[in-house]
Amino acid sequence: MTPRDTILQVTNLTKRFGGLVAVNDLTFQVREHEVMGIIGPNGSGKSTTMNLISGALKVTGGSIILEDHDLTSLPPHKIARFGVARTFQLVRILPHLSVVENVIAGTAFAHKARWGAEAEQFAEALLERLELGDKKNQDIGSLTYIDQKRLELARALASEPEILLLDEWLAGLNPSELRIGIELISQLREEGRTIILVEHVMDAIRSLCDRCVVMNSGKKIAEGTPAEVLSDKEVIRAYLGDE
Amino acid sequence: MDILISGLLLGGTYALMAMGLNLQYGVARIMNLANGEMLVLGGLAAFWLFTASAISPLITALVVAPLAFAGNWLIYRYLLLPLVRRSKNQGQLEVDSILATFGISFALVGVMVSIHGEYITYSYLADPFSILGSTVALNRLVAFLAAATIGAALYIWLNRTYAGTAVRAVSVDTEAAGLVGINVDRISALAFALGGAVTAVGGTLISTFITLDASIGVIFTMKALIIIIMGGVGDIRGAIIAALILGLVETTVATVIDPGLTLAAAYVIFLAVLLFRPQGLFGRRTS
Amino acid sequence: MNSGEMKFLVIGVVLALGAASIPIVSDGYWLSIATTAMMYIALSTSWTLFSGPTHLIALSTGAFFGIGGYLVGSGMSDYDQSFWLMAIIAPVVATILAMLIGLATLRLSGVYFVIFTLGLAEMIRNLVSWVQNNFLGSRGLYVLTDFTEAHIYWMLLSVATIVFLAGWLINRSRLGFALRIIGNDEQVARHVGINTAWSKVILFMTTGFFAALVGAIVAPRYSYIEPNVVFSPQLSFLVVIMALLGGIHRLWGPLVGVIPFTLIWEAISISFPNSTTLFLGLSFLLIVYFIPNGFVGLFENLTGRMRK
């Protein structure tokens, strides 16, 4: 494998909530066209890390650099305009907008902004690709759970992100939906997108990720290919306890 | 010194009224903009009973409390709970409850104007009283002491009894409180009713030294809200200190500059809080 | 422009022309009611530009309207300026004030904004009275012009038309779209790249601008300006209620609410002058419990059902 350029550099990232340290001195890189997984037990700081990168939470210490831009203390809308797109742990679609408008929302304010007829065509093409084409005129309240997830993903993709953050995007899907979901993300991977995903579903981690960072109690305890980290003793201990 | 004493006395009564609204907003999650009208109703009751039968406002307070409790319970149960149930999210509930309590507020003002459109003023214990070398009206002192007693009782109730603990649990996390078997609707109704009763009693006390009228309630709602935001939502200690600060600042501005500027002074405080400590005096920055 | 928009444009032009001819066919009582209604149409529609998509109940109309009226009165009486100059200055002052208020409160929870605007008119009235009494001398403020009621009516009609055009343009623009996204989910809005605070502040400034402009134009109707009259908290609530009654999810919604409400309000003010507050309260309750989406919502529900 040829080494590729680092696109996101996270250095000594720390987040404190009062006395609680949710993310502790975390350092990792994400390279271009790479799918990187962040895994770890509940409460280990995975989602907090995503929220720090996307700007939903303010950083206490350390730095986040995307290409040449320092994102560390920027508000979320500026981070988004440098090309960071995200989905949410609990799916968040815009309930009073149409399906197409939900996707346009992703592109209209992004770094390569589109508007008007151009945005509409772009959004429809994207819906088509995510197999939502036949549902573009459907009432938004009648979308199934996986379709809502797809729509949220379409909104994130509409911004043509430099890096895409998927926060437990597969959570809550039933087994057959899960297969579709994993297939979808692996397509994104083949397109060469750069993705960070936080997941609990180990099958997805194994089949999708080039590399993983394992977190426990806010710290990085392992890093490597999925096979490497999942056989690491400390990782097993973190998941299963000391016995 | 005069300013300090009368400012603190005024602040003590403000604290009581803010405590009432804090219970309603912090626990029942209803931004009750009709709170000031409860206060005026409490004052109106004191005025009636005093002018008609020379009944002491302190006794009136004992009558006002259960009546206001019942009235506010009914308002919560039949007007606000349906809104809580129909709202899909907190934002929707916020808008609905603001509009509904505006409605209640105006309806109450309308009713009060039609029965007593003039000023609500009477003279009770308006004798001078000397304290720490400065002279204040006795009624201010009595009102302050009564407010302090009620506030202390409320504080003990919240911290030492089972029902009080349930109220605090709901204020911290509605959902989790429901999960551990607390009947959130009933506790919310209880907190709302209790809050209304506390505010109404505050009104009875305040009417002994401040002239009220039927449409002045909104000013008190405004002040109570500023106090709550300054103290931090749900924080009783914060609310007391905030109320004392507001009382002091208002008294200072009224004495030194102009009595017409007390609301402007409250706004300056409000702005300072919004700009520098939006999480409240003792609140911790969450993000 | 598609055919649906074309249709609306034609209806709009016909309505505006019809409205413009009212002073020719009637005068006196009905013209004065039409003028009042036109004032509320401009105010409610511009209020909805901000509060419709964001769901933030702004109670600042009375404050900005008062600034418009007061500055015209003060400028003409105290400083011998022309009506026209003051009618330009007043909205600019209100816009700057709206910006400052917006920047201070709109970055935080919506509740703070509502509370801040709740006492705003009263607070500014207190300040203005104090400044007037202590520094300017409490002389009366006269607004003496040659305007007839018809002139004022036509000016208000022009403002209302501009408000509609502005609203139409905003709704088609990225700013309008941003506001709709904010109203749906503010967190999502931030993460798709919207500067949510500024988007809200800009719309709030627009609302403040128009409210002050209307206040300035209406000032000659009073001839004698009293802070107690122009800084009316009640006006803020009337504007809110008329907009909600019509429906705030459509640009033309408030228009549908203003006309019947103005007529009823006038009738009640004359027949039961002591019951206006009670009526206001009951109207709020009626809307919240029975017509939460306004007349427009009712109408759309009905036609939706008929289609099924």
Image (cartoon, coloured by chain):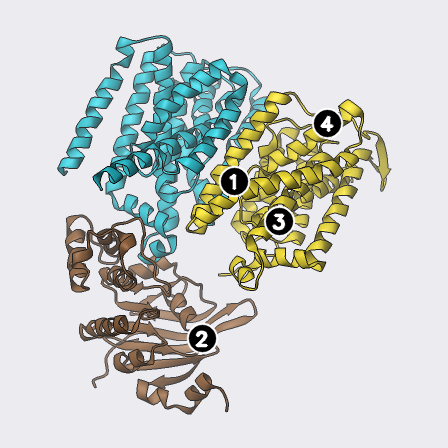
- Residue plotted at (28% across, 68% down): A163
Judge if badges 4 and 2 mark residues of a common chain.
Answer: no
**Percent of width and height locating residue B244:** 69, 45
Number of the label disc, if any, that sits on residue B47: 4
Q: Which mark is residue B191?
A: 3
Q: Chain of mark 3?
A: B
Q: Relative to residue C94, is residue B197 depicted above or below? A: below
Q: Which residue is mark 1?
A: B79
Measured as percent of width and height from the top left, residue B112 is found at 61, 26
Q: What element does badge 3 sit on?
A: helix
Are discs 4 and 1 both within one chain?
yes
Q: Is residue C191 left or right of residue B263?
A: left
Amino acid of disc 2 = Asn
Which is in the foreground here, disc 4 or disc 1? 1
Task: Give me the chain letter of mark 1.
Answer: B
The CA span between labels 1 and 2 is 41 Å
Quarter of the picture containing the N terminus of chain A is: bottom left
Compared with B287, C166 (above or below) is above
Q: Colour of chain B?
A: yellow
Q: Position of residue B5 (x, y in %)?
A: 77, 41
Chain C palette colour = cyan
- Type of residue at label 3? Ala
**Residue identifier under label 2:** A42
Chain A color in figure: brown
- How far apart marks 4 and 2 lie (CA) works out to 60 Å
